[in-house]
Image: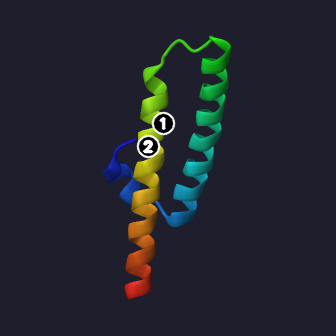
Amino acid sequence: MKATELHTKSVDELNDELGRLKKEQLNLRFQQASGQLEKTARIREVRRAIARIKTIAAQKHAAAAKA
């Protein structure tokens, strides 16, 4: 998901997406540990998407505190 798409979402939607990605990250870790993971690059994509969402949520929180 691109950052421009995330900027249009509300904080609640960002939190929902964050929860979904964290569950996916956990499943990917289990698959990797058991040797069933086929797309190893997906771990990196999910990790970066989580960081992107956390950054945008923090920016929105700071902007709300300023206003």
Q: Are marks 2 and 1 in contact (CB under 8 Å)?
A: yes
Measuring from the top left, give residue 2's x and y in whole percent: 34, 44
Q: Is 14 left or right of 16, judged from the image as shown?
A: left
Q: In the figure, residue 28 lies in which quadrant?
A: top right
Does residue 8 appear in this view?
A: no
Q: Which residue lies most toward the left here?
A: 4
Amino acid of disc 1: Val
Amino acid of disc 2: Ala
The C terminus lies in which quarter of the figure?
A: bottom left
- Residue drawn where x is 45% and y is 53% of the image: 53
Measuring from the top left, give residue 34's x and y in whole percent: 68, 14
Residue 16 vs residue 65, the one in the foreground: 65
Does residue 50 appear in this view?
A: yes
Within-10-Å neighbours for mark 2: few <14, some 14–19, many 20+: many
Q: Is residue 42 above or below residue 4?
A: above
Q: Which residue lies most toward the bottom here?
A: 67
Q: Which residue is mark 2?
A: 49
Q: Which residue is mark 1?
A: 46
- Residue drawn where x is 49% and y is 64% of the image: 10
Residue 30 vs residue 65, the one in the foreground: 30
Q: CA distance from mark 2 to mark 1?
A: 5 Å
Q: Is residue 2 above or below residue 28?
A: below
Measuring from the top left, give residue 46's x and y in whole percent: 48, 36
Residue 50 vs residue 1, the one in the foreground: 50
Within-10-Å neighbours for mark 1: few <14, some 14–19, many 20+: some
Q: Is residue 11 above or below residue 44?
A: below
Q: Is 30 left or right of 64, judged from the image as shown?
A: right
Q: In the figure, residue 41 lies in which quadrant?
A: top left
The N terminus lies in which quarter of the figure?
A: top left
Measuring from the top left, give residue 4's x and y in whole percent: 31, 52
Label 1 sits on a secondary structure element that is: helix
